[in-house]
Image: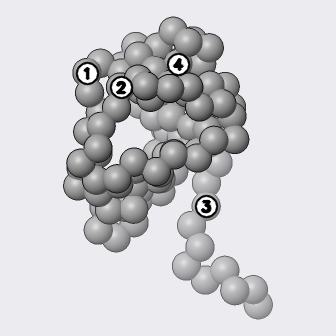
Amino acid sequence: MGGTAGYVWTTVDDAPVKELFPGIRSRPLWTGAGGAKAQVLEMDPGSCWDGIDVHTPGPEEVFVVSGTFHDGDREHPAGSFLHAPAGSWHVPQSAVGCVLFVFYPEG
């Protein structure tokens, strides 16, 4: 017997697609206790978050899977990791498009 008891798994292709803004889609992968959640965010070329994305109640962890993510201040190419503490904010956008893995440890 393996040690996989309690494991939860899915694929990005199986995750439902929710359009957040034009050209920006969320694919929820997992939701845990206390509101923790993991998702994939897909941003088409030229897309921009509508308004300011404020990180509440907790931090946001982002890994750029592909493309180039721009947080409103600087560009982050594929392979970049970003930690945004609770209360921080940014304006997500991408000139060339990107795919992000986003984790909210506190919801």
Contact between labelled residues 4 and 3, with CB atoms less than 8 Å apart: no
Residue at image position (58%, 47%) is 81
Chain-order first, disc 3 or disc 1? 3
Residue type at numbered disc 3: Trp
| Residue type at numbered disc 1 | Gly
Q: Is residue 4 above or below residue 67?
A: below
Judging by the rendered image, the residue that carries numbered circle 2 is 91
Residue 36: percent from the left, percent from the top? 37, 61
Residue at 41% across / 16% down in the picture? 48
- Dot 4: what SS? strand
Secondary structure of the residue carrying tag 2 is loop
Q: Residue at x 62, y 14 (%)?
A: 96
Image marks 3 and 2: residues in contact by CB distance under 8 Å: no
Q: How far separated are the C-alphas under marks 3 and 2?
A: 30 Å
Q: What percent of the width, then of the height, locates residue 25?
A: 46, 27
Determine whether label 3 and label 1 are within 8 Å by CB: no
Q: Amino acid at mark 4?
A: Ser
- Residue 7's disc is none
Residue that carries the numbered disc 4 in the rendered image:
94
Q: Nearer the viewer, residue 85 or 94?
A: 85
Q: What amino acid is at disc 2?
A: Val
User: What residue is disc 3 on?
Assistant: 9
Q: Which mark is residue 51?
A: 1
